[in-house]
Image (cartoon, rainbow, N blue to C red):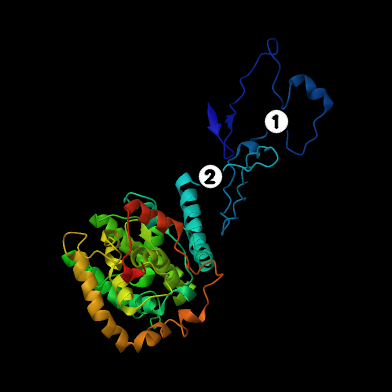
Amino acid sequence: MNKRLGDGRNRPIPRPQPRYSAATSRRPWPALPRDTPRPDNLAPYGPPPQSSWKYQRAKPQAPVWPPPPLPPTPTPPLPPTPELPDGTTPPSRKPAWRRWTKWMVIGFVVWLVVTPVIYRVWTPPRTMFMLTDSAPGDTVFQEVSLDHISRHYIASVLAHEDAELGTRMGPFHMSDFIDRTETYLESGEDLSGSTIPQQLVKNMFLIRGEWVGTRVFRKGVEAVLSWPFNLMGDQRQLELYLNYAQFGPNLYGVCSASWYYFNRPPWDSNPWDAATIAGLLPLGEDARRAPGGGVDVESDGTWLVASTVANARNKLPQRISQMGGWEGAVATVGITDSAGDHPPLGEPKSCSVMPQVVADRLAAEGAWWSSEYGG
């Protein structure tokens, strides 16, 4: 029978020793006091029995409070980093879509900063609206500097499209934009139209399409992109707008339109022709040239071009007069001189000679000129 001690070990319980015969077994170790020395002659009797005090249960110790802190848990070692060849980077643990999203956002911000700077000093010969024009024939475009554009053209375009371009803070009024959005969502029509900065970014970067989703998307992108491009300044925005506006099928810019319709350079104009050109801006893809020159107001068959051009011819002179004449109209964007103050001879962007693309278009159409437009 075993007895469990305080230290968890099992020890046999001492029992009384039986009496053994001297002939059959050795006598047990004699019981001696604890401090009595044992003589060497007792060795034949075997090892002495263990004293009884070792079999006593250990007294439990009082608990220590507060308990001692536990030893720190050792941190497992990191797996060894594999050695990579020179010039290579370890693979990233981030999801692929997060990496792509981050770089797309960074690229879009860089594009917003860099692109207006590029357009501030350079006029690309093609825009997204030109590339998506489905009309047959080649694109007719020729750049002209704002210095060599008649102030009658500039005043008419400002009075017809955006009279507050030079006096407004920002590309548009936020309250007007909200009202336009609510009106469009209720009736599906945009009666007031976009400002010149909004139309400019639409002509440069957005695609055509009359589907409701496409038009809503364009309006939203116009509102966003017009803010960074508004930093180019009013005169530069007006110059790009007059170069990129559509005045006929595959016909872009006031330089090409002036030669195509009136057989004159853009710096030689009058209020009547300027109002006619301004009236074509919302209907550029529907406009056609009349036989002998000028705009065919019956070309679309629905009297839409005729009514728009007639409305511009009747109302623009009064609006320009209210702005202080053409001098006061162009002064709102910081123009204080006339096109005659800039001699066109020798200037590469004066559009003093009919562009070859315009001459090819007229030849393909078999056009002729009446004496009203210089023969």
Tell me if 59 is positioned left or right of 230 in this view: right
Q: Is residue 177 visible?
A: yes
Q: Can residue 233 be seen in this view?
A: no
Q: Indicate whether 171 appears above or below 133.
A: below
Task: Check disc 2 and give the amino acid type.
Answer: Arg
> Residue 235: x and y, percent?
46, 76
Residue occupied by mark 1? 31
> Residue 316: x and y, percent?
27, 80
Circle 2 packing at 10 Å, graded few (<14), some (14-19), many (20+), is: few
- Residue 181 picture quarter: bottom left
Circle 1 packing at 10 Å, graded few (<14), some (14-19), many (20+), is: few
Name the quadrant of the C terminus. bottom left
Residue at point 47%, 53% (across, down): 104
| Closer to viewer: mark 2 or mark 1 | 2
Q: Nearer the viewer, residue 154 or 82?
A: 154
Q: Please, what secondary structure does the residue beneath circle 2 have?
A: loop
Tell me if 43 is positioned left or right of 201 in this view: right
Residue reaching furthest to the right: 40
The tag earlier along the polypeptide, 2 or 1, is 1
Q: Nearer the viewer, residue 204 or 373?
A: 373
Q: Nearer the viewer, residue 19 or 146?
A: 146
- Residue 359 picture quarter: bottom left
Residue reaching furthest to the top: 23
Residue occupied by mark 2? 93
Mark 1 and mark 2 in contact (Cβ < 8 Å)? no
Q: Indicate whether 94 appears above or below 41.
A: below
Q: Please, what secondary structure does the residue beneath circle 1 have?
A: loop
> Residue 242: x and y, percent?
40, 69
> Residue 78: x and y, percent?
63, 42
Residue at point 83%, 26% (across, down): 40
Q: Which of 284 and 363 is in front in this view?
A: 363
Task: Check disc 1 and give the amino acid type.
Answer: Ala
